[in-house]
């Protein structure tokens, strides 16, 4: 699995605005201040394929902060997005012990969807003990400010 993850890196550098995009939706970190190395990993269709079941779209890892951003770029289905991130964390957390797991969902529609509280709580039970948070945004571009992910927990 470690080799599959390494082979699915789409970048590993200290760019100012590391980002991932899909279907008109983008997630972007603000790395202008710190210029730390960030690795982008294509999960859906590379680390895991269709036969592996559901998974999120990307991981962005900040090794120096031991933070992993599990990213799902979605049209409207919040419940499925939560399931995808939850499943991906379960499949990958043994490779990132003692890291902070951050869940990020970027929805393209402007109208909030209905969230299944049980699904949200289940993901929360995985993310929060690591010191991470779940953020769901309804916009095509979500910029994660440095002050949010720079905090070490």
Image (cartoon, rainbow, N blue to C red):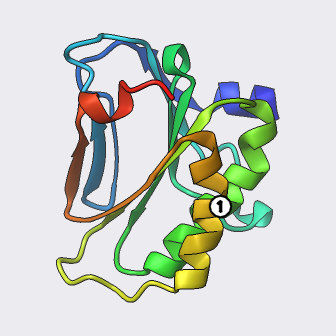
Q: Which x, y percent locates residue 125?
A: 65, 61
* Camera-nearest residue between 75 and 134: 134
Up-down relation of residue 118 to residue 50 (above or below): below
Residue at mark 1: 125
Q: Which x, y percent locates residue 129?
A: 64, 47
Question: Is residue 2 left or right of 77 when viewed as pictured?
Answer: right
What's the residue at 61%, 64% (across, down)? 123
What's the residue at 46%, 24% (across, down)? 152
Up-down relation of residue 48 to residue 33 (above or below): below
What's the residue at 37%, 32% (across, down)? 149
Graded by Cα atoms within 10 Å as few (under 14), some (14 to 19) or many (20 or more), the crowding at tag 1 reads few
Question: Which quadrant would the N terminus be assigned to in this image?
Answer: top right
Residue 45 appearing in the image: no
* Camera-nearest residue between 81 and 128: 128
Up-down relation of residue 144 to residue 23 (above or below): above
Q: Secondary structure at mark 1?
A: helix
Residue 118 appearing in the image: yes
Q: Which x, y percent locates residue 67?
A: 53, 30
Q: Which x, y percent locates residue 47?
A: 69, 43
């Amino acid at each position: 699995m470690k080799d599959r993850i390494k082979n699915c890196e789409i970048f590993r550098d200290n760019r100012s605005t590391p980002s991932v995009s899909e279907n008109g939706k983008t997630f972007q970190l603000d790395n202008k201040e710190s210029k730390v190395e960030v690795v982008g990993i294509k999960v859906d269709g590379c680390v895991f394929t269709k036969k592996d079941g559901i998974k999120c779209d990307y991981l962005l890892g900040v090794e120096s902060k031991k933070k992993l951003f599990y990213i799902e770029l979605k049209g409207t289905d919040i419940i499925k997005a939560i399931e995808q991130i939850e499943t991906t964390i379960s499949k990958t957390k043994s490779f990132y012990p003692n890291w902070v797991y951050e869940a990020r969902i970027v929805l393209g529609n402007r109208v909030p969807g209905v969230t299944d509280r049980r699904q949200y709580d289940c993901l929360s039970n995985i993310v929060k003990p690591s010191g991470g948070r779940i953020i769901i945004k309804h916009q095509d571009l979500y910029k994660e400010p440095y002050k949010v992910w720079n905090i070490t927990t």
